[in-house]
Image (spheres, helix red, strand yellow):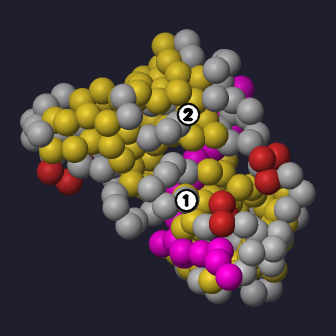
């Protein structure tokens, strides 16, 4: 199975900060990667698909990019409602595999 | 707007079979892929498998032969069965819809609709 290595596992940031989360795939997955946000006690929500495509209704402060097998989720200006755990998911191969998650906490 | 709702027992005994249903409302089940994902307490997400509306399936090999996903289009629901459960199967179980969007090199996939999740504990 494809291994998705996500970093950092957690970070502390302030409202207004620029935040970057990275996922590295164990082999090439083209741009077949999505980013999901999960708040405590809630189901994950789709933010970005195909590495850089913003899902409908998702604020434009979220963006995604790819460089080879490295994928980045950027939040340009962190808002109070963005404090959550973020997961990457590769959808190139089966079984689908998630990164370990990044918890974004308030500094 | 499509909505999903999981249902099933919240407590299952070790060695027995976990059975969950996911009801689809507000849209058709006769398209797309229908997914089961779980999340053990305090841990990350694990993809369990999918069923396509055509009936084709794909399962996570980590579950070996314990998992079966089926669909009943007349009831607009799909189901998960996990046999020989242990405490390690204690988790929140989510159902989700996965859509495929075509482009020149193939398809992009994404899970855009999720159920709220249902907690299943395995204990005697």
| Residue B99 seen in render | no
| Residue that label 1 marks | B40
* Residue at image coords 38%, 39%: A102
Q: From what the image shows, is residue A98 above or below residue B41?
A: above
Percent position of residue B111, x then y: 57, 53
Is residue A51 left or right of B74 when viewed as pictured?
left
Residue at the image point whose x is 49% and y is 13% from the top: A67
The image position of residue B24, as x and y in percent, is 63, 78
Provide the major secondary structure of the magenta segment. Answer: strand
Q: Secondary structure at mark 2?
A: strand
Residue B105 appears left or right of B95:
right
Does residue A12 appear left or right of residue A57 in this picture?
left
Which quadrant holds residue B85? bottom right
Q: Chain of mark 1?
A: B
Residue A46 at what x, y percent from top left? Answer: 45, 50
Residue that protrudes farthest toward the top in the picture:
A68
- Residue A94 showing in the rendered view: yes
> What residue range appears in magenta?
B103-124
SS at circle 1: loop
Residue A12's place in the image compared with A59, above or below, is above
Point out residue A4 in the picture as x, y percentages from the top left corner.
Answer: 57, 30
Q: Please identify, in this view, whether the residue under mark 1 or under mark 2 is nearer the observer.
A: 1
Residue at left offset 22%, top offset 44%: A105
The quadrant holding residue B15 is bottom right
Relative placement, left or right, of A106 versus A102 is left
Q: Residue at x 80, y 85 (%)?
A: B74
Chain letter of disc 2 in the image: A
Residue B121 magenta-highlighted: yes
Label 2 Cα crowd, 10 Å radius (few <14 / some 14-19 / many 20+): many
- 10 Å neighbourhood of mark 1: few (<14), some, or many (≥20)? some
**B2 and B20: which is toward the camera:** B20
Q: Which residue is mark 2?
A: A33
């Amino acid at each position: 199975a494809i291994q998705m290595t996500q970093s950092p596992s957690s970070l502390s940031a302030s409202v207004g900060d620029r935040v970057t989360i990275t996922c590295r795939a164990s082999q090439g997955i083209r741009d077949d990667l999505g980013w999901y946000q999960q708040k405590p006690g809630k189901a994950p929500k789709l933010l970005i698909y195909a590495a850089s495509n913003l899902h409908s209704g998702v604020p434009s402060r979220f963006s995604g990019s790819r460089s080879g097998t490295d994928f980045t989720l950027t939040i340009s200006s962190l808002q109070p409602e963005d404090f959550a755990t973020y997961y990457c998911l590769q959808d190139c191969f089966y079984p689908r595999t998630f990164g370990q998650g990044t918890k974004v906490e308030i500094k | 707007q499509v909505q999903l709702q999981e249902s099933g027992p919240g407590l299952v005994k070790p060695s027995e079979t976990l059975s969950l249903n996911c009801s689809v409302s507000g849209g058709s089940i006769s398209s797309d892929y229908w997914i089961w994902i779980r999340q053990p307490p305090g841990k990350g997400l694990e993809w369990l498998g999918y069923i396509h509306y055509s009936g084709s399936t794909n399962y996570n090999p980590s579950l070996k032969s314990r998992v079966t996903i089926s669909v009943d289009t007349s009831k607009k629901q799909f189901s998960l069965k996990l046999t020989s459960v242990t405490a390690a199967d204690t988790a929140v179980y989510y159902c989700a819809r996965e859509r495929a969007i075509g482009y020149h090199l193939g398809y992009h996939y994404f899970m855009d609709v999720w159920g709220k999740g249902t907690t299943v504990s395995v204990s005697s």
